[in-house]
């Protein structure tokens, strides 16, 4: 397992080839040996062989017509006495060639199959220049029941088998070497996409999360792996981007919160030092210091409460889920706005009861913040319109003003904590920049969404969409 994938595949392919060649060579050798031996056995047990041996023995080893036809050199026939001694030995094959002393080494006891019937051939050692003989024997009645032995040398068979072994060895070595080269080439080409994936993975690990692996196609196994890896990389990239954005928002939130809290704390500290240095001797200065300390304390408490509310909502803490009539909330918000700004034209369009499931206090805070935002950031004579409708199972509450409106860039960030569309306005008039953030968080906690768009003719329209409650759906 310490080898590379390329090495393991190459070893596996070569091992299979070697095993296949070994089995093939063994089977070929055994079948070829059986075939050659079978041909000799057929010669030994043929009737023509019996007749040839009988004629040679009968003629005292003098060759007769057809007596040596088809038999190899050093083929021997012998006439044995009853005690197993050789009475006569004749050469049947290779007459006219140099005489040889080669002969079969017979066992002490021979099997017989009956008169004139050769036994099944068997192999015995040879002498002189013949290593093995294939032998058969039979009892011949014409010679008083003496045994005739017929032996054919096996040297040609051994030479052919040795030649076959050499050929198999050379061919097998060539096949293994060729297969190893082709397997290495195929594996090298086949694993090249994995090498590219590894290089891309290294670049991704170095911080380039935008890279994607190739190939990514459903037609191949590696391509399907590429598709899966790219999908995983997309999720990882999105998770990193989300984590980075969350971290940036947290840092900005902490910085903005520290900045917002520093102002009232500085005021409180300053007025406290005023009292300590002798403001008590001047009733007017003392009253001013106490009043400003109280106002800044209240302001700081409100700011902390708003930040805690946003934090709770971001953590997914559940709100109350009771039937809430948006018509009533909108009517109360319009009445409050008329009291705060009696010279403004504030209209309400809420003809029907629109009931949602939610937290009455937080939903009132949403509508109040939107209306206050319209009153604070538009000229005094600008009308404000509040509307509550329902459509396709969704409650829609909108607050529309006809003031200067919002630039497109501000619309994308208007719901971020501590963000102010007008950086020059004071905190006393514009607040800490948490109102719309609270609106977005509360609406999201109710399963809805809030958006801002440009009012026709100028101005801004904030629209809140919430799921309708069961009471409204039933009606």
Image (cartoon, helix red, strand yellow):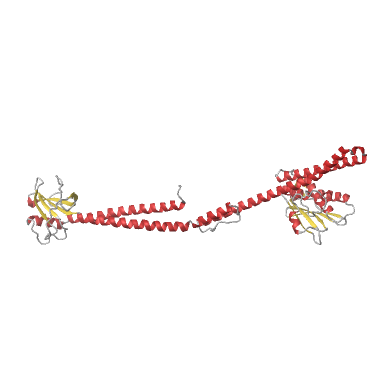
Q: Is residue 54 left or right of residue 184?
A: left
Q: Is residue 446 visible?
A: no
Taking depth in this image into account, of 177 and 133 the one nearest to the observer is: 177
Q: Residue furthest front?
A: 277
The x and y percentages for residue 76 are 13, 54
Q: Residue drawn 26% across and 57% down?
A: 163
Q: Is residue 358 left or right of residue 207?
A: right
Q: Exactly how many numbered labels are in the figure?
A: 0
Q: Is residue 387 left or right of residue 286?
A: left
Q: Is residue 238 left or right of residue 132?
A: right
Taking depth in this image into account, of 132 and 27 the one nearest to the observer is: 132
The x and y percentages for residue 349 are 82, 54
Q: Residue drawn 90% across and 37% down?
A: 280
The x and y percentages for residue 87 are 8, 50
Q: Is residue 166 visible?
A: yes
Q: Quadrant of residue 57?
A: bottom left
Taking depth in this image into account, of 315 and 471 the one nearest to the observer is: 315
């Amino acid at each position: 397992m310490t080898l590379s994938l390329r090495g393991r595949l190459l070893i596996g392919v070569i091992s299979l080839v070697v095993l296949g060649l070994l089995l093939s060579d063994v089977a070929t050798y055994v079948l070829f040996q059986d075939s050659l031996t079978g041909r000799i056995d057929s010669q030994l047990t043929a009737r023509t062989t019996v007749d040839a041996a009988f004629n040679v023995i009968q003629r005292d080893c003098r060759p007769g017509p057809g007596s040596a036809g088809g038999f190899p050199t050093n083929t021997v026939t012998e006439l044995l006495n009853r005690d197993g001694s050789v009475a006569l030995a004749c050469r049947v094959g290779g007459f006219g060639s140099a005489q040889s002393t080669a002969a079969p080494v017979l066992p002490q006891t021979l099997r017989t199959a009956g008169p004139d019937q050769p036994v099944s051939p068997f192999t015995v050692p040879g002498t002189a220049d013949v290593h093995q003989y294939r032998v058969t024997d039979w009892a011949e009645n014409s010679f008083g029941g003496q045994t005739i032995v017929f032996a054919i040398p096996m040297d040609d068979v051994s030479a052919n088998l040795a030649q076959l072994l050499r050929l198999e060895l050379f061919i097998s070595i060539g096949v293994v070497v060729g297969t190893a080269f082709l397997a290495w080439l195929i594996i090298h080409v086949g694993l090249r996409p994995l090498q590219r994936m590894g290089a891309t993975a290294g670049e991704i690990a170095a911080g380039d999360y935008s890279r994607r692996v190739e190939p990514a196609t459903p037609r191949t196994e590696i391509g399907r792996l590429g598709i899966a890896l790219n999908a995983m990389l997309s999720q990882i990239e999105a998770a990193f981007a989300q984590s980075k954005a969350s971290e940036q928002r947290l840092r900005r939130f902490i910085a903005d919160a520290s900045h917002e809290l520093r102002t009232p704390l500085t005021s409180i500290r300053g007025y406290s030092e005023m009292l300590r240095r002798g403001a008590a001797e001047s009733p007017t200065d003392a009253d001013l210091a106490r009043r400003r300390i109280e106002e800044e304390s209240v302001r700081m408490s409100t700011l902390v409460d708003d930040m805690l509310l946003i934090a709770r909502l971001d953590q997914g803490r559940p709100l109350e889920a009771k039937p809430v009539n948006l018509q009533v909330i909108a009517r109360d918000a319009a009445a409050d706005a008329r009291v705060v700004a009696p010279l403004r034209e504030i209209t309400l369009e809420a003809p029907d009861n629109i009931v949602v499931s939610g937290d009455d206090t937080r939903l009132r805070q949403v509508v109040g913040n939107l209306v206050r935002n319209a009153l604070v950031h538009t000229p005094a004579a600008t009308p404000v319109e509040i509307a509550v409708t329902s459509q396709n199972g969704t409650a829609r509450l909108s607050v529309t003003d006809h003031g200067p409106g919002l630039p497109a860039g501000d619309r994308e960030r208007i719901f971020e904590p501590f963000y102010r569309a007008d950086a020059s306005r004071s905190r006393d008039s514009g607040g800490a920049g948490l109102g719309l953030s609270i609106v977005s968080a509360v609406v999201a906690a109710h399963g809805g969404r809030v958006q801002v768009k440009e009012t026709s003719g100028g101005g801004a329209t904030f629209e809140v969409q919430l799921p309708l409650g069961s009471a409204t759906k039933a009606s």
